[in-house]
Image: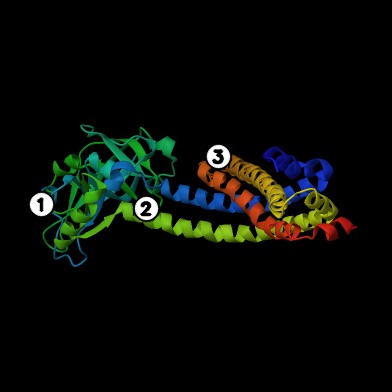
Amino acid sequence: MRTQDTIKLATRMFKTRPARTWLTILGIGVGIAAVVVLVGLGYGLQGIILEKIVFGEALLSLNVNPPTSKTIELNKKSLEEMGKLEHVQDVAPLANFTSLIKFGELTGSIFIRGVNPNYFKYAGVMPLEGSLFGSGETNKVVLSTAALKLFELKPKEMIGKRVNFKIFVPGKGTDETQEVSLGKEYEVGGIVEDDSSIYAYLPTSELSSKFQITTYESARVKVESNQYLAAAEDQIIKKGFVVTALSKTVDQANKIFSGIQIILAIFGGIALVVSAIGMFNTMTVTLLERTNEIGIMRTIGGSPTNIKVMFLSESMVMGFLGGIVGIAIGVFGGLSMNFILNTIATRMGGTAIQLFRFPIPFLLMIAAFGAVMGFLTGIFPARRAASLSPLDAIRYK
């Protein structure tokens, strides 16, 4: 049988039984749309979480903390030792102090985090509003969104405002604390999104100019490339410090969301099974309707293989079109939900998010899966049609 003849026979159901054919395709599409929407939700949740993690140099840094036992301190000497390790490019420490912040007539308690500008890119800190301070910008401060609640202001409203601080510096004794005023006002240059902790970032040079920083709370160690992360981590751990890597967090998050996507796909697969049963029923009815026709084809020279190819081609066409329809329904539904949710969120003062995402490779896989499902659904009717006796098929009414 020629290829063009096979194509004509496999697509003639659109002329002979258009309503039943398109209803079958729609049924397959609904099942596939359920899979598309649920897996798209998994991709969306994964994207929302991973967007909070800034890639680039942040993935090439190690977060170093001193042990809880207090026997080992993260001080200037230990920082210099880390900076001399092989394949380590830079070390950016963070000093943390209890402080009072004053804005106008309002005063509140806040943590001051003394950092150098390079700390931000190693820690993946990005501004929600405004900008982070750079090298030489000693008159700017960066606040967390939790700190704004002290003054009941929104991020945009706080940019450009001026605040001052009083630092409580621990003394040598366990109960000794020294109150140090920084002696000037700082302009709020940026806001970072963090509703869980009240803090402000100030240049380390501003703190060290008023008092001596003896210990640090943590440090970011930047290595040359990701192949040296494990080696640098092992060397720092041997010194007694606690080390975490952002790259491991990303890998773990991806594994977790891969599992979530599989679970969501299984739930969507229930609807897909129902659609597959409907398609199987359609192909079985088609077999009964064409039994006499199959007998004629066999008597004029059609082989069992020709009959199989004809039925499988028809089922694959319906399966593939069902996949395309399912993708259209699923993507349209997901994007519509994104639009509705983002419209509501922006009107209520929130930020827009992409709750449903549909990567192109995933959609191509779904289209191919529709054709495969059509093939699998058509195997039994195709075999049954090919095994019919020509004489019995001709006599069938």
**Would you say 312 lies left or right of 265 here?**
right
Identify which residue is drawn at 65% across, 43% down: 324
Q: Residue 266 placed where, x, y %?
A: 58, 61
Upstream in the sequence, badge 1 or badge 2? 1
Upstream in the sequence, badge 2 or badge 3? 2
**Would you say 81 lies left or right of 28 here?**
left
Numbered circle sitting on residue 81: 1
Q: Are marks 1 and 3 in contact (CB under 8 Å)?
A: no
> Please, what is the three-letter code of the amino acid marked with disc 1?
Glu
Numbered circle sitting on residue 250: 2
* Residue 276: quarter of image: bottom right
Q: Nearer the viewer, residue 346 or 299?
A: 299
Identify which residue is drawn at 51% across, 50% down: 43
> Please, what is the three-letter code of the amino acid marked with disc 3?
Thr
User: So how many labels did they put on this image?
Assistant: 3
**Mark 1 surroundings: few (<14), some (14-19) or many (≥20) residues within 10 A:** few
Q: Tell me the SS state at disc 2.
A: helix
> Please, what is the three-letter code of the amino acid marked with disc 2?
Val
* Residue 340: quarter of image: top right
Measure the C-alpha gap from mark 1 to mark 2: 28 Å
* Residue 273: quarter of image: bottom right
* Mark nearer the viewer, 2 or 3: 2
Q: Residue furthest bottom?
A: 69
Q: Residue 208 placed where, x, y %?
A: 14, 43
Q: Residue 268 placed where, x, y %?
A: 62, 57
**Mark 3 surroundings: few (<14), some (14-19) or many (≥20) residues within 10 A:** few
Q: Residue furthest right?
A: 397
Res. 356 in view? no
Q: Nearer the viewer, residue 156 or 311?
A: 311
Label 3, on which residue?
346
Q: Quadrant of the N terminus?
A: top right
Q: Quadrant of the C terminus?
A: bottom right
